[in-house]
Image (cartoon, rainbow, N blue to C red):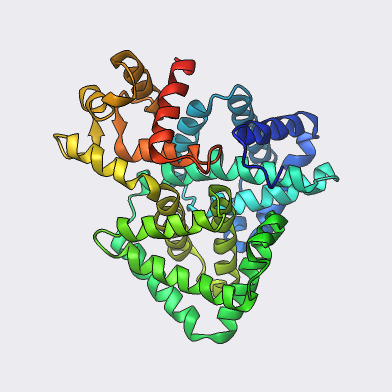
Amino acid sequence: MAAKTSGNAVEEAIKCVTSCFDKIDKRQLATILFNKLLASSPVVKDRFQGSNMRLLATSFIGIMQMVIDDLAGMDIKACDARMKQLGGRHVAYGVGADMFTTYQACLLSALGEVMGDFNADMKYAWTFVWSVFVTSPLINGWAKTARLDRNKVLKQVTTDFADIQKCSDCVRKFQDTLFSRLFSYDPTIKDLFKDSDMEAQKKKFVGFIAKALEMAQKSDASGELRKLAAMHKRLGVTVTHFAYFEESILYALGQAMGKEYTGFAANAWTMVIHTEIVEAMVNAPFAEIKEMLASVNQTGTGVLTQKEWCAAFKDYGSKAELLAAYSACDADGNGTVEAEEFTRMLGRQQLSYPQASVSEHIAMFVKASQVKA
């Protein structure tokens, strides 16, 4: 499964996850998962101090069951909305965005122990599904509620990365940990580097992050992002690889920075890697769509009316078909559609159709909306 990029790859991954979840001992999973979370860092342990451990462990499984039920019915829209709301609520709980990637890593490790035969296909499916349909919307929901100062966040990570680059041992630890973690998720990723000098590639990754941080601080880096996205596509890099890259780089940063990777720094890095690099690269091919929608958006808020939506996509279907697509794009169910929301959906659609053009993605989205309507 790890090497597949066919149109039903998403459905196959979801079926694998739901089938696995039906068979596992959920009480055992809850116990192992919670113990791994407590052992993951002193910060996590302090966060749960004084809590009813059994109740918390059970609630984790309850959330997993809710996710599984939505995905089993292919109700991705409902799952996305639930996870965004849940992510937002965690701000009030005092939980940072970095906890979501920590939870994912602990979950994968716990599944390996509970299932015993946690083979490559299963690991791929769980990582893929959890990264895309759970961790990503959790972080987006958290970010929307937390309202971190973007300039302060970028300043923090830029300073942190400059400090890492000054320390040769830190750079080496960061590089080695990043690639080791990345390859552990999907061994086929090694094929992307089979004819390359790995030491040179490791240096390139450090350079890529530095470049991405530089672009993030520009007022308009969409053109450069599009070029980078196109280059990665030519090299065979898919959206799935970016999902693995996200968790791997955050894990590697934690190893390289040690005690400095806590609190605001951890949240800042999680937000920058997720929003400014991973999502920006995934959605870069659709930047022109976002710009086109901005041109018809009379309020300039990025929130589109049905009239504006139909005017923008008049060449892709009838009014009734376009209104059905408008409704399908309303991921959070608030009766409106944001340009950012739509480009994110198209970015996710690349998971199933990585080679499709922008216009083909729009046409497929409109067509799929008729089936759901």
Determine the image quadrant of residue 330: top left
**Which residue is at 68% across, 47% downward?**
3
Q: Is residue 31 left or right of residue 73?
A: right
Where does residue 246 sit, x and y in percent of width and height?
54, 56
User: Measuring 58% from the left and 48% from the top, which residue is drawn there?
Assistant: 240
Q: Is 4 in front, or is 347?
A: 4
In terms of image quadrants, where is residue 126?
top right
Which image quarter is the N terminus in? top right
Left/right placement of residue 195 relative to residue 164 reads right
Is 356 placed left or right of 297 in the picture?
A: right
Vertical relation: 308 (above or below) 203: above
> What is the residue that sits farthest to the left in this orientation?
298
Give me the residue at 45% from left, 31% from top: 81
**Residue 107, placed above or below residue 64:** below
Q: Where does the image place residue 31, in percent across and percent down from the top left? A: 75, 43
Q: Indicate whether 215 appears above or below 289.
A: below
Is residue 88 visible in the rendered structure shown here?
no
276 lies left or right of 110: left
State the quadrant of the C terminus.
Answer: top left
Quarter holding residue 60 = top right
The x and y percentages for residue 46 are 58, 57
Q: Position of residue 10 (x, y in %)?
A: 61, 35
Asked whether residue 317 is in view, the answer is yes
Q: Count the marks: how many?
A: 0
Q: 317 or 27, which is in the foreground? A: 317
